[in-house]
Amino acid sequence: MLTVPDSSVLIPYLMQRAYMARIDRLIHTGRLVLCSVVAEEIMAGARDQDERRRYDRFFAPFVNRSRSQSSQTFRAPTTFR
């Protein structure tokens, strides 16, 4: 089963405050799917360039898997598995 986390889950994860084991497990098993809207919310909330670069590094390995008119979803690549 695939999981599409909301920004309310990814923000604490990216700040290393919560959900670490769960999100890491989803990434490593290729079951984490990101919505482009959530990624944009997170990027918009970056407080400085260092945080923006950290978020960029997190999102970069995800591969565009499907498109729709309203958003895109990104799935962890097989290199994480």
Image (spheres, grey):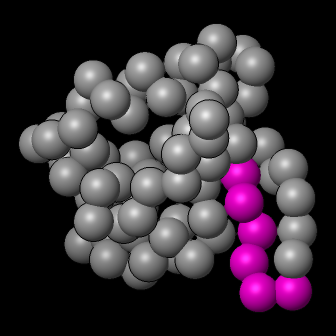
What range is drawn magenta here? 69-74
Q: Is residue 65 above or below residue 76?
A: below
Residue occupying the point 27% across, 23% down: 21
- Judged from this view, the residue extending furthest toward the front is 1
Residue at point 88%, 68% (across, down): 67
Task: Name the residue nearer the viewer: 24 or 40.
Answer: 24
Residue 25: in magenta span: no
At which x and y percent is residue 50?
32, 55
The C terminus: image quadrant? top right
Front residue of 2/45: it is 2
* Location of residue 18 with respect to 49 vertically, above or below: above
Find residue 35 and report its image quarter.
bottom right
Judge from the rendering whether residue 15 lies leftward or rightward of residue 35; answer left or right.
left
Q: Is residue 3 visible?
A: yes
Q: Position of residue 72 (x, y in %)?
A: 76, 68
**Which image quadrant: the N terminus?**
top right
User: Which residue is drawn at the image coordinates 34% and 54% (left, top)?
Assistant: 10
Query: Is 71 one of the magenta-colored residues?
Result: yes
Can residue 48 be seen in the rendering of this structure?
A: no
The image position of residue 20, as x and y in percent, is 25, 31
Between residues 53 and 6, which one lies in front from this camera angle?
Answer: 6
Q: Which image quarter: residue 42?
A: bottom left
For residue 69, side relative to residue 24 (left or right):
right
Q: Residue at x 23, y 38 (%)?
A: 19
